[in-house]
Amino acid sequence: VIAKECSLNSKNISHTFYTLEMKDWVNVFAITKDKTVVMVRQHRLGKNLVTLEVPAGMMEDGEDPKDAVIRELAEETGYATDNIILLKSINVNPAIQNNVCHFFLATNCEKITQTNFDDTEEIETELIPLDEIFKTPDNGNELIQNSVALLSILLAKNYLSEHGDLK
């Protein structure tokens, strides 16, 4: 956390603001060859919830976002593919954070290895039919409680709809 003293000259005031210095992240909406979505369920301390999310993680220093998403997908789920598309890179919360999140779509994923969690991770992989996961954001279902995971789903749905791959 970085404290920054900021002034607003037009009102003759100053105030201390706090910025969270964070590494960039990657998120991946991964679809298997049989049109199921590779999701992960894990405990999140901020709200003390177990959430259903897309595979995701922090990038290593100097790591390319595509390399990071390949690594995170394999580490968290054991899945891999050569079909990876960058959907969007966006500031997570520029009011208080300095990092960017890179959203990817991975298609034709296959289970190729065992998971390899970080020391602090306990993750369960869940496969959900593609049509079911896309119903979730639209019908008010409480399945997805993570805003970044929801954005990943919506970006993938938009991309697949525009490219005729949504079947």
Image (cartoon, grey):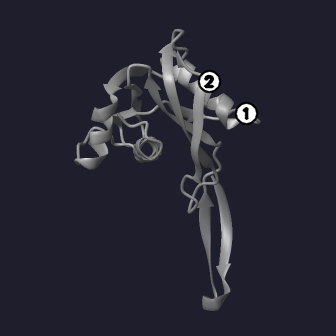
Hey, what amino acid is under mark 1? Answer: Glu
Specify which label sits upstream in the sequence, 2 or 1: 1
The residue under the point 31% across, 27% down is 129
| Camera sees residue 141 | yes
Q: Nearer the viewer, residue 136 or 16?
A: 136
**How far apart are the alpha carbons under marks 2 and 1?**
10 Å
Determine the residue located farthest toward the right in the rendered image: 62
Q: Is residue 118 visible?
A: no
Q: Do the CB atoms of the residues marked 2 and 1 lie less than 8 Å apart?
A: yes
In front here: 162 or 114? 162
Element at label 2 = helix
How would you rate the neighbour count of disc 2 (Cα within 10 Å): few for under 14, some for 14-19, many for 20 or more?
some
| Residue 49 percent coordinates (x, y) | 33, 36
Identify which amino acid the numbered label 2 is placed on: Arg
Between 70 and 62, the one nearer to me in the picture = 70
Q: In the image, what residue occupies the spot 40% across and 27% down?
A: 39
Side (left or right) of 107 relative to 5: left
* Residue located farthest toward the top when viewing the structure as drawn: 113
Q: State left or right for residue 35 relative to residue 90.
A: left
Where is residue 121 shown, x and y percent of the image? 49, 23
Query: Would you call the spot at circle 1 few (<14 residues within 10 Å), some (14-19), or many (20 or more)?
Result: few
**Which residue is disc 1 drawn over?**
63
In the picture, the quarter occupied by the C terminus is top left
| 24 with respect to 87 (left or right) | right
Vertical relation: 119 (above or below) 107? above
